Image (cartoon, helix red, strand yellow):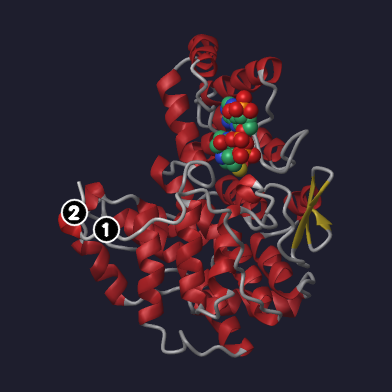
Amino acid sequence: MTVTRGLEGVVATTSTISSIIDDTLTYVGYDIDDLAENATFEEVVYLLWHRKLPNKQELEELKKQLAENASIPKEVIDHFKMYPIDKVHPMAALRTAISLLGIYDEEADVMDAEANYRKAIRLQAKVSTIVTAFSRIRKGLEPVEPRKDLSFAANFLYMLTGEEPNEIAVEAFDKALVLHADHELNASTFTARVCVATLSDVYSGITAAVGALKGPLHGGANEAVMKMLTEIGTVENVEQYIQKKLENKEKIMGFGHRVYREGDPRAKHLKKMSEKLTKLVGEPHWYEMSAKIEEIMNSTKPLPPNVDFYSASVYHCLGIDHDLFTPIFAVSRMSGWLAHILEQYENNRLIRPRAEYTGPQKQKYVPIEQRI
Ligand SMILES: CC(C)(COP(=O)(O)OP(=O)(O)OC[C@H]1O[C@@H](n2cnc3c(N)ncnc32)[C@H](O)[C@@H]1OP(=O)(O)O)[C@@H](O)C(=O)NCCC(=O)NCCS
């Protein structure tokens, strides 16, 4: 048996959804740079689910379906109201709410392709409502009903604050959603595929994926980046803080990647957005600290920033609570998870690797009275 720790380099499936080749990320063959500059999130959702960009009519239909399915059951809202609210991380609330949605979906266990697609629409439509409702309830506010006339990105910001967001905020948020939508066989997507490869249902697959995204080595890194920036406080403190962490062999959140070697192509878009937005809100130090950290990492490690590094200051400038950063990642990645789940069902085989056993051998059972 050859053990490949962390399954590094292991090719576990074929897929027609997204690819990372020579540090270039594509969704269905479209370069992420092209999509980040030109596509809306809804277009990307359609692309990931249908492997083609939508025409006008197809896009309108998808938007209509998302708008019509955005409300969440009252039971989910009531459930949130029962939580010891200051102790529950929004990712835990999201994970639980997705599972709960499955309970209230009569089609949850109907496994034909059409029913699974309908569930994909429902999950994508409801995920923003769940995250924003939880955010408001824990602040003692009532959730805001989704609006049918707003884009997916605008609706999220609207439901979060109760106010219609400005164009710059919507554009930035939409771009961030495009950049996070899919990423080949990342840890949470793999988790989703492993789960549904047992022919378990879509809700189980997404619940498992949210759990995997929550960890700081994956989606949780964006919140950890903001925590680090807050701890550092000023540009002058950066050098000493980072050097100390590196000397102690601690990881710098938002850097490194399992697949990219030269750099994460999504990071440069978020870096540009971070520079613009931090200036716009009069808090340029977040960008300046981030750029300084990147400079130090570059000359010492050298590890390039990943998608989570500059997204932290971008979300902060949009007025988003820091512990909502990872749920926002989930709002976007929902589209990729669902695309992969539907693809897995299309040509399924149970995913079941092996482990090399390294424990004791040939032991004999000892009755409990004789055990020390
Ligand atoms: C993304 C990540 C999990 C990839 O992990 P991986 O491929 O298993 O790589 P490893 O954790 O084995 O790291 C390989 C080496 O680089 C170092 N390294 C990796 N990321 C590092 C970081 N962010 N800061 C400092 N050192 C890092 C490791 O310490 C290790 O060094 P060593 O060989 O001297 O022990 C890892 O880079 C990381 O933990 N980054 C920080 C968390 C993060 O930003 N996650 C979001 C990813 S999009």
Q: Which mark, residue 74?
A: none
Q: Which mark, residue 366?
A: 1
Q: Is residue 312 visible?
A: yes
The location of residue 272, given as percent across then percent down, is 68, 34
| Quarter of the rendering containing residue 26 | bottom right
| Cβ atoms at labels 1 and 2 below 8 Å apart | yes
The location of residue 328, given as percent across then percent down, is 50, 52
Residue type at mark 1: give it: Val
Q: Secondary structure at mark 2?
A: helix
Q: Is residue 325 above or below residue 146?
A: above
Of residues 351 and 258, which is closer to you in this image?
351
Q: CA distance from mark 1 to mark 2?
A: 6 Å
Residue type at mark 2: give it: Gln
Quadrant showing the N terminus: bottom right
The location of residue 30, given as percent across then percent down, is 82, 58
Q: Which mark, residue 370?
A: 2
Q: Residues within 10 Å of mark 2 (few under 14, many from 20)?
A: few
Of residues 55 and 360, which is closer to you in this image?
360
- Horizontal arrangement in the rendering, residue 341 relative to residue 226 (left or right): right
Q: Residues within 10 Å of mark 1 (few under 14, many from 20)?
A: few
Q: Secondary structure at mark 1?
A: loop
Residue at 70% x, 15% y is: 299
Of residues 362 and 45, which is closer to you in this image?
362
Of residues 349 and 86, which is closer to you in this image?
349
The location of residue 74, given as percent across then percent down, is 29, 76
- Classify mark 1 as within 8 Å of ligand 1 or not, answering yes or no: no
Residue at 21% x, 59% y is: 83
Q: Is residue 309 visible?
A: no
- Ligand 1 shows up in the quarter that is top right
